[in-house]
Amino acid sequence: MVLALAVAATPLAAQMPTPVTVPADSARAKAADRLAAVIAPDSDAPMVVEALLKGMVAQLLREDPEMADMEAEFPGLFKALTDAWRPILLKVARAARPQFRAELSLLYQANLTADEANEAADFLSQPDVSGYFAAVRSEVDFSVTLRDAMGDGAVRPASLRADVAQASAKSANYLTPELEQKLSTFFGSPVGRKLIALNPRKAEIEARWANYSAPGSENEIEIATFEAMLGHIAKTDPKLATAMRKQLEANGNLPKPPR
């Protein structure tokens, strides 16, 4: 379970989605680029990864009693695993971010004028508004999305939207009456309604990129998982860790780093 979950957390598609080209000189393209950057900044990647790691641990506790027992026997095992997974997931997320934004930009170019895209970017970049949406993202646990990945391996747009909806409900405490009114006014405006109408297509883009895996990342995850587990167990029971390693090697189940 633990290895399958870790591999599932790195998106499973074999190749990057078809690249897109964004016209660089038009006001509409520049405004759409700006809006995409506000909605999906590079600084968001660590937050998404932390939410994903939190969801992975929660799923392990729910669905793998053996791993829960191992955590009880070797306290800190889950932390060792998440510390091992974090840099790999960050690398994958950061590698995909620019092209993901480019696809978002094309969506906004096709559906918003330059003025509309700039109006949306102005609103969403206000500190109280951006702070609220950051709070929502921090509450996402990817529970529904991870079930997809653990099932047939394909993350679905509806699952991503369900996870965000759950996070929004959890984030109600972050809403002041003033901010709630502010959000209601904007999303009830013509530009806000357009953004809401684009959410299903935005989720399709997000799911496509959630299903992207950088070459070699699955092998990296496998190696990191085994080494983190064995290394952590070795701190308190080196004989057991050595025996486990020998058994895994004998069975051909211990992945080897690429040459």
Image: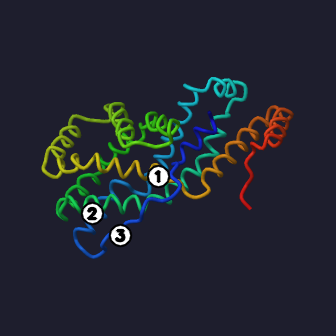
Q: Is 25 situated left or right of 78 in this image? A: left
Vertical arrangement, residue 175 with respect to residue 90, above or below? above
In the image, residue 142 above or below residue 46 = above
Q: CA distance from mark 3 to mark 2?
A: 13 Å
Ranked by sequence position, the earlier of labels 3 and 1 is 3
Asked whether the residues under the numbered discs 3 and 2 touch, taking CB atoms below 8 Å apart as contact, a structural biologist would say no
Colour scheme of the picture: rainbow
Identify the secondary structure beneath mark 3: loop
The disc labelled 3 sits on which kind of residue?
Thr
The amino acid beneath tag 2 is: Ala
Q: Position of residue 190 (x, y in %)?
A: 13, 50
Residue annotated with mark 3: 21
Q: Residues within 10 Å of mark 1 (few under 14, many from 20)?
A: some
Residue 117, picture quadrant: bottom left
Q: Tell me the residue at 48%/59% (across/down).
A: 16
Query: Which mark is on residue 45?
Result: 1
Amino acid type, label 1 = Ala
